[in-house]
């Protein structure tokens, strides 16, 4: 494991341990060292690649009010695990309307390192407004989520019956099983321009 991954794991676990995900020092540090132009570029490129590889994502994207794209989330762990990454909200008009950080911590029988991306498609104005007005939220609390299985585009695995938001995973690399979003915290950040 390299130093960057160890630091990322510790930072991510620290974020999840704090009660406020909008004012903690790790989030402020992350936003101070992130570039808005790089996050925008990487998020747009990842969404374009997802659309090229997955017709279901492209079809859902045509109807979405906004897509929150995390092009690179790093996950690592040995018994205790953590994941983190930065992304951008891309409106249906193509403009960037905000920057976000995703973090999660887990514990249990796990070992390995992986990198992946994911995109959250907000299907109506209420779901988009709910997310864009809050400084942060935990997936599973709001809005409702449907995870679209990448391998079988027509098969949906639902965590709720409401379809306000769809999630697609993409570009998974590494040796660690199990991708999930339940309990992931998403925090709005203000990166450098």
Image (cartoon, rainbow, N blue to C red):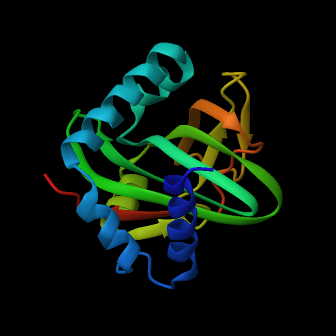
Q: Position of residue 40 (x, y in %)?
A: 26, 40
Question: In the rendered picture of this protein, how many numbered marks are placed on residues?
Answer: 0
Q: Position of residue 127 (x, y in %)?
A: 43, 55
Q: Judge left or right: residue 158 versus residue 170.
A: right
Q: Residue at x 69, y 45 (%)?
A: 179
Q: Judge left or right: residue 12 versus residue 126.
A: right
Q: Residue furthest left?
A: 193
Residue 113, above or below 174: below
Q: Quadrant of residue 93?
A: top left
Q: Residue at x 70, y 57 (%)?
A: 77
* Residue sitting nearer the eye, 102 or 163: 102
* Residue sitting nearer the eye, 93 or 89: 89
Whether residue 131 appears in this view of the structure is yes
Q: Residue furthest bottom?
A: 19
Q: Residue at x 57, y 60 (%)?
A: 6
Q: Position of residue 152 (x, y in %)?
A: 72, 21
* Residue sitting nearer the eye, 190 or 130: 190
Q: Position of residue 49 (x, y in %)?
A: 43, 20
Whether residue 135 appears in this view of the structure is no
Q: Residue furthest right?
A: 109
């Amino acid at each position: 494991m390299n130093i960057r991954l160890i630091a990322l794991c510790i930072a991510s676990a620290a974020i999840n341990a704090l009660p406020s995900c909008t004012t903690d020092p790790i989030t402020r540090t992350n936003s101070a060292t992130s570039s808005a132009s790089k996050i925008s570029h990487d998020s747009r490129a990842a969404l374009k690649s997802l659309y090229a590889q997955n017709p279901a994502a492209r079809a859902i994207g045509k109807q979405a009010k906004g897509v929150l794209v995390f092009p690179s989330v790093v996950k690592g762990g040995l018994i205790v695990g953590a994941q983190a990454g930065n992304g951008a909200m891309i409106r249906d008009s193509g403009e960037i309307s905000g920057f976000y950080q995703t973090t999660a911590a887990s514990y249990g029988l796990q070992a390995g390192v992986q990198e992946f991306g994911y995109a959250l498609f907000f299907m109506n104005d209420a779901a988009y407004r709910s997310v864009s007005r809050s400084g942060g939220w935990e997936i599973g609390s709001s809005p409702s989520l449907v995870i679209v299985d990448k391998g079988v585009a027509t098969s949906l695995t639902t965590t709720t019956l409401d379809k306000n938001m769809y999630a697609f995973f993409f570009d998974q690399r590494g040796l660690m099983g199990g991708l999930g979003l339940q309990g992931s915290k998403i925090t709005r950040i203000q990166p450098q321009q």
